[in-house]
Amino acid sequence: MGLDIAGASGYHEKNGARFRHRKRGYGMCKDAVVFFNKPKGVDLEAGKSYMYCMCGRAKEGLFCDGSHKGTGCMPLKFTVEKSKAYLLCRCKSSKNLPFCDGTHSFYGEDDVGGPVMGE
């Protein structure tokens, strides 16, 4: 699906989800670490705002708990249009954050806790 960027509003939409732009764009954070090398299925509610962990340091690895303080990372605010289960990225390297795109397959168990691959 295409990317619809709503310039002046500060939001973009992709795959049925709405994201708020951050100053550095919406790609991965250069200070992020691999939380885990497999995604996690999570039931998300349509219209509800979520703050996705971009740093990989949150206790559960998916939703921001403030652990990014002191890094260059900021959480990604997003919503979904449909209430259903989604596979969320935990390797922090997906090109479709916060959703899994299969990039985790490049990481082994020894990579967990280490830096993410470059963009």
Image (tube, rainbow, N blue to C red):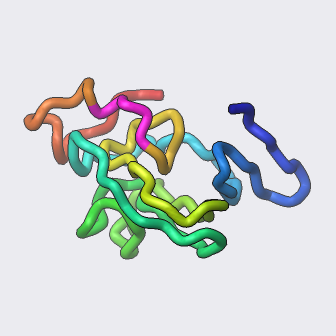
In the rendered image, which quarter is residue 116 located in? top left
Between 75 and 98, the one nearer to me in the picture: 98
Between 1 and 23, the one nearer to me in the picture: 1
Extreme residue in the left direction: 110
Q: Is residue 61 visible?
A: yes
Question: In the rendered view, does 12 fall on the left or right side of 116?
Answer: right
Q: Is residue 22 visible?
A: no
Question: In the rendered view, does 36 fall on the left or right side of 85?
Answer: left
Question: In the rendered view, does 81 fall on the left or right side of 107?
Answer: right
Which residue is pictured at 70% across the width and 54% down the height? 21
Q: Note whether 18 is above or below 112 in the view shown.
A: below
Extreme residue in the top direction: 106
User: So how many labels did they put on this image?
Assistant: 0
Where in the figure is residue 37, as x and y percent of width and height?
Answer: 22, 40
Q: Note whether 69 is above or below 115 in the view shown.
A: below
Q: Is residue 38 magenta?
A: no
Where in the figure is residue 104, as x and y percent of width and height?
Answer: 29, 33
Where in the figure is residue 4, as x and y percent of width and height?
Answer: 80, 41
Extreme residue in the right direction: 8
Which residue is pictured at 67% across the width and 50% down the height? 16
Magenta region, residue range:
100-104
Where in the figure is residue 50, as x and y percent of width and height?
Answer: 53, 70
Which residue is pictured at 48% across the width and 67% down the height? 44
Which residue is pictured at 54% across the width and 71% down the height? 45
Q: Main secondary structure of the magenta part?
A: loop
Question: In the rendered view, does 49 fall on the left or right side of 67?
Answer: right
Looking at the figure, which quarter contains the N terminus? top right
